[in-house]
Amino acid sequence: MKQILWFRRDLRIQDNKILEKASNEVLPIFIFDKNILEKLDRDDKRVTFIYDAVLALKKSLQSLGLDLYIFFDTPKNVFMKLKKEGFDEVLCSSDFDSYAIKRDKEINEIIPLKRYLDSFLINPRKNLKRDGTPYKVFTPFYKSLSWLSSSDKIGEAQINQNQKLYKYENKTPTLEELGFKRADLPEFLKKTPQNRLNDFKEKVEEYEKNRDIFYKDGTSNLGVDLRFGTLSPRMIFNEIRKSNKKNSEIFIRQLFWREFYNYILFHFPKSENENWKNIEITWSEDEEDFQKWCEGKTGIPIIDAAMRHFNKTGMMHNRLRMIVSSFLCKNLLIDWKKGEQYFAKKLLDYDASSNIGSWQWAASTGADSVPYFRIFNPYLQSGKFDKEAIFIKSVIPELKDVDVKLIHVEGALKDKYISPIVQMRYSRDRAIRVFKEAKNAKV
Ligand SMILES: Cc1cc2nc3c(=O)[nH]c(=O)nc-3n(C[C@H](O)[C@H](O)[C@H](O)COP(=O)(O)OP(=O)(O)OC[C@H]3O[C@@H](n4cnc5c(N)ncnc54)[C@H](O)[C@@H]3O)c2cc1C
């Protein structure tokens, strides 16, 4: 029996099901997928992160007496070539987004695929309601999984020692050969995944208190590891649970939001491109407003600071994601899909299901989304979560010497900053009217 171990979004050797299930002559591979890479900017930060993670994985596999063969091609071409070497099956982790489902179907016809649940805690095919339909609301979904969320430990995969490397000739491409420039990554991503997890163990006690305060480093910063599988969700669950059982509840609940959005996108694949709720909203087509939002030039300090920081680093704190998405969909009345695509292009922890689910949440069009009349006021948000304007001033040099009180009051900055592109009261009333009309049209 000859097996290909296809690493995708599980770039680790710890708790990796394919390394547990493999027991024969194996060829571990990673494919830099031309179908995906050709759509990205040449200085995409994620490619630098993945490139380094893949090389680290190669080293770890070598320490087990194995190796990692790295290809730069389409998956179809790679497997057509490998089929000639007489492989019987491909072991890989399950990947549930629409491109992955299509890709896996195609590969399965070349060499049979065996998939294992490794990037998520639950298989979205399972865990249906009693009537056989999927959950649509987070709280009952989460409650139905209390057997898992309240457990002390979730079983992890162990490495099967009976594997033998199938020797293969191929050369690892450089980042430049893939067509990319090395991008500057935020400092925390220069650490090892395990060190990031260890750092968070020190902070978990304060997570609940600090997680909304975006100028503090109060969250786990593990989104990128979860996205690319440099840490498994089971390992994160287990280590956080073990380190601080009492204070881990809120954090674990967040991990299940990730499960929920994966589950929703799996059961409602159309929600990738359509409002999950069957409502039609007359969105604004104002391209200038959208560009100003993208560039962080709206004249509203918190929005501009969040977007400028995002453009530079590829990172945005959850509370800021909530504020800028609400502002785009409600105050500017711009279609959530445009914001979703902009995030998809730059977000280091971009994950289709969480991004689509969260954008639809903000736009009040999604599963268990915010009611349409609950619209964040960005000035109140910045006054509450960045009272001293520490974050805002760190990003917007023009505001460095401005009295903080003026920063959180609409209209107070006058000639000290760009004029706001929209008034809060007017845009709030407009959004409520448009959403009401959209809803009524369906009644
Ligand atoms: C408009 C918008 C877009 C978003 N896009 C993404 C995305 O593309 N990818 C992504 O992973 N998250 C996304 N989120 C959710 C959340 O903002 C990030 O998961 C979080 O900021 C990552 O930082 P952290 O790891 O420090 O989070 P922590 O607070 O430490 O949370 C730990 C983990 O739990 C999960 N999680 C936390 N909150 C959420 C949530 N609301 N929804 C889903 N999962 C959650 C993530 O995997 C996260 O890494 C989005 C939120 C909004 C409002």
Image (cartoon, rainbow, N blue to C red):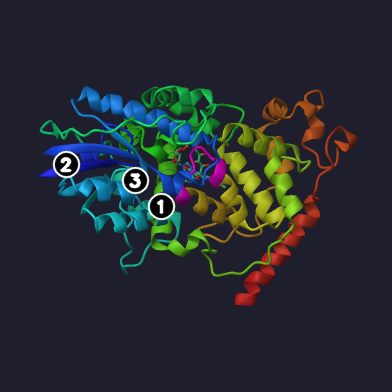
Whether ligand 1 has any atom under 8 Å from the Cβ at mark 3 is answered as no
Q: Residue at x 42, y 40 (%)?
A: 227
The image shows a total of numbered marks equal to 3
Q: Is residue 347 magenta?
A: yes
Amino acid at circle 3? Phe
Q: Please state which of the two labelled residues, at mark 2 or mark 1, is closer to the viewer.
A: 2
The disc placed on residue 231 is: none
Q: Is residue 221 visible?
A: no
Magenta stretch: includes residue 217: no
Read off the magenta span. Answer: 344-353
- Disc on res. 262: 1
In this picture, residue 409 sits left or right of residue 221:
right
User: Left or right: 100 with respect to 379?
Assistant: left
Helix, strand, or loop for circle 3?
A: loop
Q: Which residue is mark 3?
A: 120
Q: Residue visible at 44% across and 42% down?
A: 254
Q: Are marks 1 and 3 in contact (CB under 8 Å)?
A: yes
For marks 2 and 1 on the same chain, the one whose residue lies earlier in the sequence: 2
Q: Amino acid at mark 1?
A: Asn
Q: Which residue occupies 63% across, 60% down? A: 372
Q: Earlier in the sequence, mark 1 or mark 3?
A: 3
Say which of marks 3 and 2 sits in front.
2
For badge 2, the amino acid type reads: Lys
Between 85 and 271, the one lying in front of the other is 85
Separation of marks 1 and 3 at Cα, in angstroms? 8 Å
* 158 to 332, vertically: above or below: above
Please tell me which of labels 3 and 2 falls first in the chain. Answer: 2
**Residue 213 position within the rendered picture, expressed as x and y whole percent measured from the top left:** 60, 32
- Residue placed under numbered mark 2 in the picture: 21
Q: Quadrant of residue 373?
A: bottom right
